[in-house]
Amino acid sequence: MDGKLIVSSSPHISSPVKTKNIMLDVIIALIPALIASIYYFGPRAILVVCVTVAACVISEFISRKVMKRSQTIGDLSAVVTGILLAFNYPVGLPLWIAAIGGVVAIVMVKQMFGGLGHNFANPAITARIILMTSFALRMTTWVAPFAWRGTVDATSTATPLAIMASGQGELPTYLQMFLGERAGTLGETCIVALLIGGIYLVAKKVISPIIPVCYIATVFVFSAILGQDPVMQILSGGLFLGAIFMATDYVTCPITNKGKVIYALGCGIITVMIRQFGSLPEGVSFSILLMNILTPHIENLTTPKAFGVGKEASK
């Protein structure tokens, strides 16, 4: 036989789905929420998104150059991080703070740990928390929807979660909450737009529905147990944005179905605990970050052992 039988390590079959294809699907899924943010908060919404995305892409390009690594801006992961981070900003956030967030997300959270696939936590979530602690007032100054048209008072207003926490003010209706006619960050308010994006990602098999469904259901059930309005709780804050687009991050969530359920339950419980007993009205970002940190331990507990491998003999 002239030919040589070459045996290499797995995988032997290469998937046609590349990182760029996945990120492009995520970008497409985020478009409905982007359109909704422009509709409710005006042209400045697209400016905030563009500045944040530019900061992320430029930061990735420069950091890869400095670290003498091959360029990865072509995989579009920095663009996705920029859009998600901008979706966690209020529309009136100064652009220089928006840019700082992009640098923090890419350089500190992503590239310093080795780049895509090596970060221990979701870059957008972590950057938002850092900005929340550094620029608390700027990150929590909310503008009412349609204020940019001059039809309502453009002064700062309160989010539904803040109204429920204080017990003062009038809450929007369920329909207004579902459609996005409320104060909040750019990408979190319009639930219907987020659901359209989520359905698209599930249909394209980019994400599994396990984490979003279990996360949202957990918040619903535990909110009801604690005597809160469960419908208003799931429609408020950034729950749908976090559950669909950030808790499902490939790098920072478990790979097993059992692990996904445990992870989502943890996110839901922590979110409700922070909302009900914490000093902050919102807990989505902190819950996802904490469960990101626990993901390796969840995987160790839920990853099935290879066939024929038994437990180690007790010493």
Image (tube, rainbow, N blue to C red):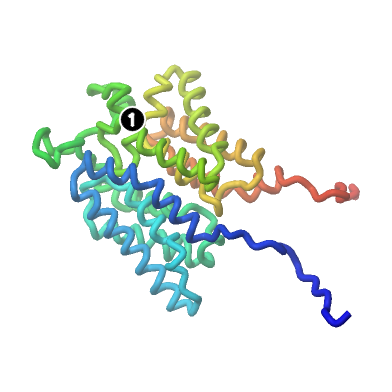
Residue 146 appears in the rendering: yes
Instruction: Name the kind of residue labelled 1 in the image.
Output: Leu
Residue 280 seen in this snapshot: no
Q: Nearer the viewer, residue 227 or 278?
A: 227
Which residue occupies 29% across, 54% down? 49
Residue 274 x, y percent position in the rendering = 44, 34
| Residue 186 sits in quarter | top left
Q: Is residue 124 left or right of residue 293?
A: left
Q: Position of residue 232 (x, y in %)?
A: 37, 24
Reading the image, the residue beneath label 1 is: 161
Classify 83 as above or below 181: below
Picture residue at 35% right of the left edge, 53% below the top: 83
Secondary element at tag 1:
helix
**Percent of width and height locating residue 310:** 87, 48
Q: How many marks?
A: 1
In the image: residue 297, left or right of residue 101: right
Of all residues shown, which one is farthest toward the bottom? 2
- Which sits in the foreground, 129 or 230? 230
Q: Compared with residue 86, is residue 263 higher up or lower down, i.e. above or below?
A: above
Going 28% across and 26% down the picture, which residue do you hit? 176
Quarter of the image where one finds residue 80: bottom left
Quadrant of the rendering where the N terminus is positioned: bottom right
Residue lying at 41% horizontally and 41% vertically, measured from the top left: 197
Q: Is residue 249 left or right of residue 44?
A: right
Q: Residue furthest left?
A: 150
Where is residue 298 drawn, in percent x and y?
Answer: 65, 44
